[in-house]
Image: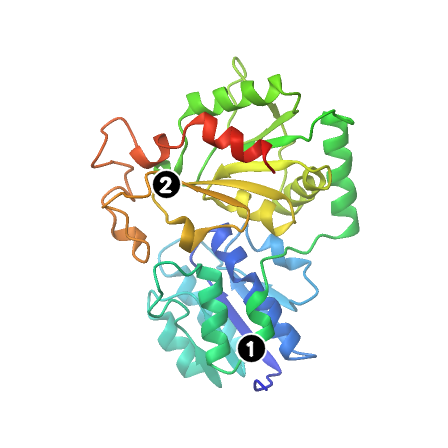
Amino acid sequence: MPDRYADILVVDLLGGIGDLLMLLPAVHGLARRNPGVRLRVLTHEPGADLVRADPAVAEVRTPRHGRPGAEREAVVEALAACRPDLAVATTRYDGIPDLLEAGAGRAVTNLWRDPPPEQPVGDRYLEILCAEGLLGATDRAARPRVHLGDETRRAGERAVARLVGEPLAPPVVLITDAGMAVKRWPERRWRGLAHALTRRGHPVLTVGPVDPAAPVGVPLPRADLPTLAGQLAAVGRRGGVVVGPDTGPVRLAAATGAATVALFGPTDARRYGMGGTDLQGLPGCGYRRPTAITEQPCWWGARCPLDAAGPACMADLDVAAVLAAVTAR
């Protein structure tokens, strides 16, 4: 049996929505294994909104500002507010592990240690926490699930019903943007996919920048993350599919239970897959580093060593392959 803790601080300050979502099974597992625990989460906005209403989470803290050192200051403040019995962190920069190891009763500060290239990141987190005696074997099967309140679900249902009614074919949501240019699918491919889906009777909804002169589909109403989660859940309830690159909103769709078709290029689908249909572009790329993605030559500037026009791995995913994956769901 794992040890029991009364106060747990979970620190995820990597910056991405998807990073927090991949950690959710660990958060929920720690709450289950420690009944009555006061579990605090320190993370960035806007992802913090996804756990503020979560019944497993007692408190959500965020850095106070966006200047250098804000994350370290936030950790110092969280430790000063209450010394945790246990601290768990994904965050390795700016001396944060040292702060947690000195300021908590016990700290597990490296959930990235020695990852096999084919093991999903979230599974690695759970495996390490099991090895540390903090979770049990049954926790290893957990998948990210975001908590949706009743009003959030109802609002999502209303928004999607207003846009698609009761269609002959399930709706499809295209999440056309990504937080990094290197993960973006070419715009012409999005248009080709949207046209093919429309011809088959699927209502096409979009999340992301839209050119009013040539829209790809009908935009979902702009919303905060919990509201978007309700909308994506409503699409999933109708048997719909959410399509997009390796980015937070697609992970959010998966965490609501919606079916996903995720488009992977610079990141390895074996490591970062979402559990739906994960399509890998250019699987044989010699520059891809599954366990050290930030060291890839393409990562920061989207400058592909194989194609000056843009990431060859994303261009390798053609419309026909993505359409087949969507319509097979």
Name which of mark 1 and mark 2 comes first in the sequence.
1
Classify the position of the N terminus by image quarter: bottom right
Mark 2: amino acid: Gly
Q: Residues within 10 Å of mark 1 (few under 14, many from 20)?
A: many
Comparing 199 with 251, the one in front is 199
Q: Which residue is mark 1?
A: 135
Residue at (44% x, 52% y) in the render? 272
Q: Which residue is mark 2?
A: 265
Quick one: SS at disc 2? loop
Give x and y (percent) for residue 314.
36, 34
Comparing 60 with 139, the one in front is 139
Q: Is residue 64 above or below residue 325?
A: below
Comparing 205 with 224, the one in front is 205
Q: Is residue 65 above or below residue 59?
A: above
Give x and y (percent) for residue 87.
49, 76
Identity of the residue furthest to the top in this view: 213
Residue at (69% x, 31% y) in the render? 170
Give x and y (percent) for residue 257.
65, 49
Q: CA distance from mark 1 to mark 2?
A: 33 Å
Quick one: SS at disc 1? loop
